[in-house]
Amino acid sequence: MFELTYKNLQVNNIEKYSENYKGNNICILKGPNDSGKTTVLSMIKLALSNFKPDNIDDEIMKEKSKIILNSPDFEMNLFISSYDNKFKIEIKYDKKKGYPEYYINNKQEGYTYLSDNLQILYEVPGEPIKKLERIIGDIKDELFDYERLLEKYRDYIYKAFEDLKNYEESEDKKNKLENKIKDLNKKLEDYNSLLKQCEKESQEINDKYVYIKYNKLNNDIILRTSELESIEREIQKLKKKNKRIQRSNKKIRDYSNQIINKSNNIYYSIIQLKPLFDSFVKKDNVFYEIFEKELSSLNSREVESISVNYIVKLYSYLDNIKELVRTELERKENSKLYLQYKIIDEIIKVLNNYIENLDIKILDSNVGELLKKLYVEKEKYKRDIEGVEKLENLKNVCDSLIAELDELKNLLNTYEKEKQIESDSIEENYESQIDDLENRKNELSDEIDSLDKEIIKIEDKYNEIQNSNKISVSDIPVIDDSQLSNLEKDLNKYKHICEYYNNKIESLNRDKDNLINELNRLETIKKPSTTMTRDELESEYQRVDEVKEKLNKYIKLIDMLLKSDKRGFNINNSEIEFYDKLGKYISNILKYIYHLHEKYYLLNIDFINREYIVRLNEEIGEQRISFISIGTGTSALNGLLARMKQDTSGKKQIILVDEIGDMDENNLKNLIKIAEEEVKSNKLLLLLMARPESNDLNAKSKAICDSYRNLKEDETNE
Amino acid sequence: MKNEENDIKNLLKELLSEEEYKTLERALDYAKKRSD
């Protein structure tokens, strides 16, 4: 009896798999391809191999076993009992526990005990030739894989060679770059030292320059301030003068008014007194000029229109008249009539004085009488002396006018003088001078401001220089513009030199940075992990090609082998050698072939003559069995039958046969018949065979376990 | 089927020179490292 249950198997199409199989000692697993038949066989093989896939020879089964064990929660239970039910095996496995439990006849035993009591036979039937072809095909596939692998390896070697070359070249470049950087550093050091020296000297000159410049500016400020003060004083002076001029103008205006009034008064006097002159002087040209033609000049409203010449002329004219009148008067006053008249007049005055102030009674009547007589007498003389009065009047008028003219002349003189003072002032033009001075003053202020600003700029530096005593008093140069200009030139010169050094340093630093960048880039080129040298890599590359060529040649030779169905090849020695080694290699894998119920030890395969070179036992020497003499399907069956018949020294057998579809019906019947005998003798515990069924019929059905009918009947009978 | 006996390397060891075989082994090592 046989029963297998399992769960938690993780495969792609688990839904197609049944997890429970049960049958008697001879069973056929039926089902379409990929329904779990080989998996069931593998599971039993794995259980009987202590759950160690490495213990399994067959590659397919080994892979299946690995997949089974990859399922983390996989659990299985296998039960097999002998036909008479007296020998029972139970194997329990839980992946989580990690180890199997073996029970033989309900008693837990170790795996060794199990393997000591059990022989497992596994067979995939098929013709030995087919098997051989499959092995050769596998070899070809593997060679092909190796060829691909060699191609990849060759690429790797090529890359490693290129990387190593690149790395070695980069190392070389790095060395050169490092040397260049060293050179640059040396140059930089030199230029930095030169720059430092230049800056130091420049600084010294600058200190001197600042010192002198400061003092010069200070001097300039002092000079300008002094000039400014002097200008201030000058302005004040001129302003005072201006005030004086303003006062002088007022005087002139006063004089002018007086002159005009005086002149106008003289004019009107002359107009009024003109009749007096008419009667005395001759009306000649001079008279007309004086009294008519030029007289109006005195009636002007402007001083400048009053003719001084006329005044002089008038003055002189009046003086002449006055002289004439005086002469005439002297002549007339010296006359008897005039004297008489004067006496009478004097007596009248005395008498009138007497009458008004004295009270002498006795004289009253006589005095009155006398006065009457005196008045009559006076009237007589009056006509005679009338000319004298007129002359006296004229003389008085002349005196008065001359006096007026004198005053007018004096006024005019004073006026002229004041005017002269004023005109002098105007000539001096104080206002414009003041303006000029103010402008200069502003200029100076601006200059002082500008100098102040300049001095502020260098003041800190100057103080620093002074405090540091960098320049001794003896060094203080005389302030000299040429000296300052020379210092400026020197400063400029040093500035250019320092700039040159700076530019040089910047340029060198740029070069250095570029080199460092390049160096850093090269630093990223790591040494390849290969331990080979470039030469070794080169020869390795060539050798890989050679090996690849050889593999390719082997593949072609195998192709020839697979295609050839004729006896013999037209081949050379090296190809003979290849086939010989291939034959030995495959013989070593196959080890045995079964022929006519005999097991032969396989020594070699002669592909050229298509024969197996075998030995039955030590006594009998080498034999040759042709490929074609091994019948279809009989080899596997014969192999199995031969092994079933062998003495197992009491070991029970379990036979697993995959792909019995490759076996013809007669052979299968023969196998089952013998197996039945073995089951009934309780030597064979289980013959489990897998047979595929057409996919088309029931593509989705799961594999089932079909028990051998005869055994069922026997069981029923029993 | 693959065990020490049927490893194709055994065949190639016979077929290739010592140097060639060493090269092949290095190629296999390389492939193994890559797959690791």
Image (cartoon, coloured by chain):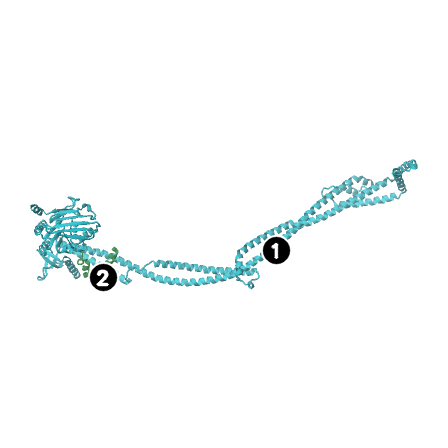
Q: Residue at x 21, y 61 (%)?
A: B21
Question: Do we see residue A146 in this rendering?
Answer: yes
Q: Colour of chain A?
A: cyan
Q: Residue at x 39, y 58 (%)?
A: A514
Total marks shown come to 2
Residue A85 picture location, percent across and down: 10, 50
User: Which chain shows up in green?
Assistant: B
**Residue A536 vertical position relative to residue A299 in the rendered view, above or below:** below
Question: Do we see residue A659 in this rendering?
Answer: no
* Real-space Cα separation, disc 2 to disc 1, in angstroms: 108 Å
Mark 2 residue element: helix
Q: Amino acid at mark 2?
A: Lys
Q: Nearer the viewer, residue A131 or A492?
A: A131
Residue A618 picture location, percent across and down: 9, 62
Residue A234 picture location, percent across and down: 64, 52
Chain letter of mark 1 equals A
Say whether marks 2 and 1 touch (CB < 8 Å).
Answer: no
Mark 1 residue element: helix
A454 left or right of A552 in image: right
A426 left or right of A472 in image: right
Q: In the rendered image, which quarter is residue A387 located in?
A: top right
Chain letter of mark 2 equals B
The residue singled out by tag 2 in the image is B22
**Residue A216 vertical position relative to residue A695 in the rendered view, above or below:** below
Q: Nearer the viewer, residue A673 or A144?
A: A673
Residue A693 picture location, percent across and down: 14, 46
The residue singled out by tag 1 in the image is A226
Q: Amino acid at mark 1?
A: Ser
Q: Are marks 2 and 1 on the same chain?
A: no
Q: Residue at x 50, y 59 (%)?
A: A492
